[in-house]
Amino acid sequence: MTARTAGFTTIVLGAGAAGLMAAATAGQAGARVLVLDHGPHVGRKILISGGGRCNFTNMDTGAGQFLSANPHFAKSALARYTPADFLALVQRHRIPWHEKAAGQLFCDRSARDIVDMLRRECAAGQVDVRVSHRIIDVTRDGAGQYRVETDHGIFHAPNLIVATGGLSIPKLGATGLAHDIARRFGLRIVAPAPALVPLTFGAQDREWMEPLAGLSVTVGITCHEGEGRQARQATFRDGMVFTHRGLSGPAILQASSYWQPGQVLDIDLLPGIDAGRRLLEIKRDRPRAGGVAMLSMLLPQRLAQLMAQAHLPDGQLAGMPDALLANVGRILSGWRLNPHGTEGYVKAEVTRGGVDTDCLSSRDMQARDVPGLFMVGEAVDVTGWLGGYNFQWAWASGHAAGQAVAERGG
């Protein structure tokens, strides 16, 4: 059966989180929806998320947890489809869940529960989901009909929702299709880059980092975004892990979304502690101790040895000037490192950048100058923090577009 005889009013490209939410929303509101995906299964990125348990939302979600050239763009969609709305859907499907950290909600059993829920929601809207359909070409005719050519035939509809994601995790089939389609229809692209990704370092730094591989420490990292009145900063206090190539762990993944090539990284190894004062207290209480023993009271042993060798003389604390210890305290609170790069899209959880939000309506995700064309999810220049925020953006932006195409009709 061809799309013409099926009479689809909406084609959704991509059967991930945003695409399935958009399709289910539109279908249940009366639209006749076709979902096309080049992969063999739906929701593949959902299935590997959260260690296989899917951190499906964060109850503390707000626009402040997202990076974008327009920090206000996400507000509308996020306000109209909230974490509480998605949680209500999860509970309606009787999916057991738990809160792992403040606001972060996970499935008790498996991420498969979320995928199955979305499939059932699509079925309730009589959505036609077709996988293993490779997209060859996308055009729009003079009558406003979108023409999607695949290796299984050609499909037409007056509405097109692009939900093919970004460039992260290419082994799951990620491509630049969303960006290509956007450019084809005259939409600008904010330069994409890997985000929520481990950072790598040059050979000189790796020489001392490699012996620390596997070591984890809680740190604080303050990140900056934008300039002038739009400038914002965020401080992340979480785990950092040394690797053979550099640094990883939640704090580093968060920082990577802000980091730009050439920028330094300032790491507080003792967040919440006045490091200089603490070192002087240890000197007073244990004057016969050495530098390694002192730092080992505050840091993991291997890291303490490294910092002592780099910044402290041999001998007892009693013989070390207070000014020297105060300076070491400043180093511990603002350890400055110079990343060389990132692990790239292979290890990135999401893609920073994407379709310029100035080209889209924040209310319904529709292209301002191209009627019936919608961009949702990771394809858009809206990138969330680690911890369920990117899924909430997928649900909210997909829901906004799904409602809009149903209202728009065919």
Image (cartoon, rainbow, N blue to C red):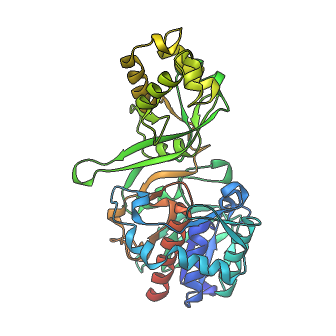
> In the orientation shown, which residue stands out farthest toward the right?
109
Judge left or right: residue 182 versus residue 5. Answer: left
Which residue shows up at 65% across the image and 32% down it?
215
Considering depth in this image, is 381 or 367 the residue closer to the camera? 381
Which residue shows up at 52% across the image and 23% down it?
202
User: At which x and y percent is residue 147?
Assistant: 52, 72
> In the orientation shown, which residue stands out farthest toward the bottom?
30
Considering depth in this image, is 130 or 278 the residue closer to the camera? 278
Find residue 80 and report its image quarter: bottom left
On-image quarter of the N terminus? bottom right
Find residue 354 and report its image quarter: bottom left
> In the orientation shown, which residue stands out farthest toward the front?
285
User: At which x and y percent is residue 230?
Assistant: 26, 54
Judge left or right: residue 281 versus residue 16. Answer: left
Judge left or right: residue 379 versus residue 171. Answer: left
Considering depth in this image, is 145 or 331 the residue closer to the camera? 331
**Residue 192 visible, this orientation:** no
User: At which x and y percent is residue 69?
Assistant: 34, 55
Judge left or right: residue 26 versus residue 222. Answer: right
Which residue shows up at 48% across the image and 83% down it?
403
Q: Vertically, is 381 above or below 286? A: below
Q: Vertically, is 68 above or below 325? A: below
Considering depth in this image, is 78 or 139 the residue closer to the camera? 78
Q: Vertically, is 291 above or below 99? A: above
